[in-house]
Image: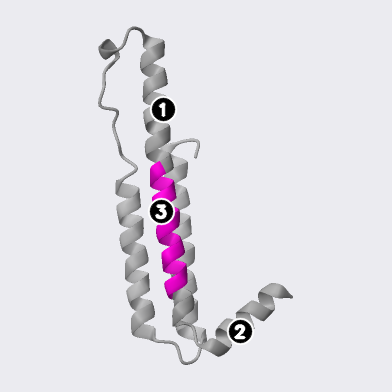
């Protein structure tokens, strides 16, 4: 991500897309466990809240801790790159887990229909 605003937009859009898929599945897929799908939607909301709150991080050093301004900038950029990379990786792993839960809640016939449509 280029900056914190874009990262927050990415998180919000991904969680919104997941939640909308859950709502659509609740409405249009027969024989789906709606209570379990509602729990997945709540889990998505919690993931979004947690991930966005983790976007606000601060570098714990000040420029006088370094030999010059260039060293400070390099260290700060490396710190933020690593922190945001870890956040994105953890977020994507959690999204993968949620997608697996969503797929597990679908009836077998619907899963097969989805696979056939994806392969066509």
92 within the magenta span: yes
CA gap, disc 3 to disc 2? 28 Å
- Classify 78 as above or below 25: above
Query: Which residue: 38% across, 32% down?
Result: 80
Label 2: which residue?
A: 112
Percent coordinates x, y for residue 49 in the rendering? 31, 55
The disc placed on residue 91 is 3
Identify the element where label 3 is drawn.
helix
Among the 4 quarters of the image, the one containing residue 93: bottom left
Percent coordinates x, y for residue 33 in the rendering? 39, 86
- Classify 28 as above or below 6: below
Query: Magenta region's main secondary structure?
Result: helix
The residue segment tinted magenta is 86-101
Among the 4 quarters of the image, the one containing residue 38: bottom left
How many numbered tags mark residues here? Answer: 3
Query: Which residue: 42% across, 19% down?
Result: 74
- In the image, is 76 to the left or to the right of 60? right
The disc placed on residue 78 is 1
CA gap, disc 1 to disc 2? 45 Å
- Classify 1 as above or below 74: below
Task: Determine the residue located farthest toward the top in the rendered image.
Answer: 67
Label 3 or label 2, whichever comes before in sequence order: 3
């Amino acid at each position: 991500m280029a900056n914190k605003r874009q990262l927050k937009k990415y998180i919000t859009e991904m969680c919104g897309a997941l939640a909308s898929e859950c709502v659509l599945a609740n409405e249009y897929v027969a024989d789906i466990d709606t209570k379990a799908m509602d729990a997945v939607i709540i889990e998505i909301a919690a993931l979004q809240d947690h991930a966005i709150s983790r976007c606000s991080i601060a570098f714990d050093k000040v420029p006088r801790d370094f030999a010059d301004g260039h060293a400070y900038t390099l260290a700060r950029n490396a710190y933020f790159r690593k922190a945001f990379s870890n956040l994105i990786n953890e977020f994507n792993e959690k999204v993968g887990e949620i997608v697996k839960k969503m797929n597990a809640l679908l009836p077998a016939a619907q899963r097969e229909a989805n696979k056939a449509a994806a392969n066509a």
